[in-house]
């Protein structure tokens, strides 16, 4: 799906592990990211008690990145950030915001011992953050919510 200079593609469930190995080849980094994301969702998403997450491949002008989005039929999901924000956004946007935050945490957790892994997580963080700010897939109201959440 074309959005400005970005394309997003839902990863087929049978190809998820291969895709994640491609974008985060260090298994520790992948496990850090996923663990952080799920813990954040548990703490920050209202009514979340686990669930299936879709993985999206994002092609940006700077290269490939990814994000996870909770697979739900809900129009909006409500989440609170560590800064006290309380916002409702669509599940796609919430997935982008949580993935941005989880990538940032992954950078900090891996920086001292695994600098190459941290650099790769940082690269994905920057690409996904740029996607968040410039993609037409995230509406203005949702973007304002994500900014409040991530600030």
Image (cartoon, rainbow, N blue to C red):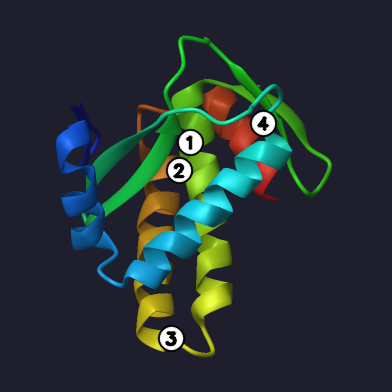
Q: Is residue 59 above or below residue 103?
A: above
Residue at point 46% right, 17% down? 72
Q: Which mark is residue 32?
A: none
**Mark nearer the viewer, 2 or 1:** 1
Which quadrant of the figure has residue 81? top right
Give the side of residue 24 with respect to residue 43, left or right: left
Residue 21 on image: x %, y %: 22, 60
- Asked if the residues shown at circle 4 and circle 1 are in contact, with their CB atoms under 8 angstroms apart, the answer is no
Mark 1: which secondary structure?
helix
Q: Which residue is mark 1?
A: 95
Say which label, 2 or 3, has the lower sequence index.
3
Give the labeled residue for mark 3.
114
CB within 8 Å, label 3 to label 4: no
In the picture shown, does residue 115 fall above or below 61?
below
Query: Which label sits in the foreground, 2 or 3?
Result: 3
Q: Residue at x 35, y 57 (%)?
A: 127
| Residue located at (65% from left, 48% from top) | 150
Compared with 123, 142 (above or below) is: above
Q: CA distance from mark 4 to mark 1?
A: 11 Å
Mark number for residue 45?
4
Gap in angstroms between the C-alphas marked 3 and 4: 30 Å
For the residues marked 2 and 3, what is the alpha-carbon distance in whole angstroms? 29 Å
Near mark 1 (Cα within 10 A), the count class, few <14, some 14-19 or many ≥20, is: many
Measure how far apart labels 1 and 3 are at the Cα level.
26 Å
Tag 2–tag 3 contact (CB < 8 Å): no
Q: Label 2 vs label 1: CA separation? A: 14 Å
Q: Residues within 10 Å of mark 3 (few under 14, many from 20)?
A: some
């Amino acid at each position: 799906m074309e959005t400005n200079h970005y394309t997003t593609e839902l990863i087929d469930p049978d190809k998820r592990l291969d895709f994640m190995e491609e974008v985060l080849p260090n298994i520790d980094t992948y496990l850090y990211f996923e663990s952080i994301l799920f813990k954040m969702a548990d703490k920050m998403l209202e009514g979340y008690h686990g669930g299936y997450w879709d993985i999206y491949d994002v092609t940006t002008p700077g290269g490939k990145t990814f994000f996870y989005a909770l697979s739900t039929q809900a129009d909006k999901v409500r989440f609170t950030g560590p800064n006290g924000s309380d916002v409702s956004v669509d599940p796609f946007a919430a997935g982008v915001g949580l993935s941005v935050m989880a990538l940032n945490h992954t950078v900090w957790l891996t920086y001292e011992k695994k600098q190459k892994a941290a650099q790769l997580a940082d690269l994905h963080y920057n690409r996904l953050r740029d996607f968040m700010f410039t993609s037409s897939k995230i509406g203005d109201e949702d973007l304002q919510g994500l900014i409040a959440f991530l600030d």
